[in-house]
């Protein structure tokens, strides 16, 4: 699982899971298999699996997901839609950083 805890202004992609802690601030799109968001995201979240918005999260952007959990206290401003079947693709912005290439592993 990739862990983000700092401020980032970029599009982020991983084939595995991603967790943004409550101190994370991401300005850009996030694409992951699963995403757990505890901090601030100003951009779209695209997950082929589950998205969890923790109680401290603040998300301004659209969410595409297979399963969505929004905890009490979470802030979400945007649209949400169920991800297409795995055989279909979702158009995304190119990633500024591919976490799979950095870590060398897939979850």
Image (cartoon, grey):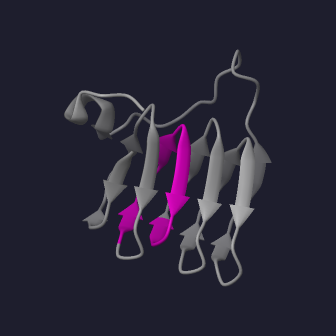
Q: Is residue 28 above or below residue 59?
A: above
Quadrant (top left/top right/bottom left/bottom right) for the C terminus: top left
Give the residue displayed 31% in from the left and 31% down from the top. 100
Give the residue displayed 40% in from the left and 68% down from the top. 21
Residues drawn in magenta: 24-41
Give the residue displayed 60% in from the left and 79% down from the top. 55
Q: Is residue 30 magenta?
A: yes
In the figure, is residue 31 to the left or right of 97? Answer: right
Q: Position of residue 16 (x, y in %)?
A: 45, 35
Asked if residue 82 shows in the view, the reply is yes
Name the quadrant containing residue 86.
Answer: top right
Q: Position of residue 17 (x, y in %)?
A: 47, 43
Give the residue displayed 50% in from the left and 40% down from the top. 32
Quadrant (top left/top right/bottom left/bottom right) for the N terminus: top left
Q: Is residue 5 magenta?
A: no
Q: Position of residue 2 (x, y in %)?
A: 35, 47
Q: Is residue 65 above or below residue 53?
A: above
Q: Main secondary structure of the magenta part?
A: strand
Q: Please identify the residue farthest to the top as the structure is shown.
A: 87
In the figure, is residue 68 to the left or right of 74? Answer: right
In the figure, is residue 25 to the left or right of 43? Answer: left
Q: Is residue 59 above or below residue 44?
A: below
């Amino acid at each position: 699982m990739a862990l983000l805890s700092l401020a980032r202004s970029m599009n982020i992609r991983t084939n595995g899971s991603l967790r943004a802690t409550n101190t994370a601030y991401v300005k850009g799109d996030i694409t992951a298999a699963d995403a757990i968001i505890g901090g601030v995201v100003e951009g779209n979240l695209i997950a082929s699996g589950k998205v969890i918005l923790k109680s401290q999260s603040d998300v301004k952007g659209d969410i595409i997901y297979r399963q969505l959990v929004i905890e009490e206290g979470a802030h979400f401003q945007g649209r949400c839609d169920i991800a297409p079947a795995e055989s279909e693709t979702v158009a995304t912005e190119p990633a500024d950083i591919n976490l799979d290439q950095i870590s060398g592993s897939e979850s």
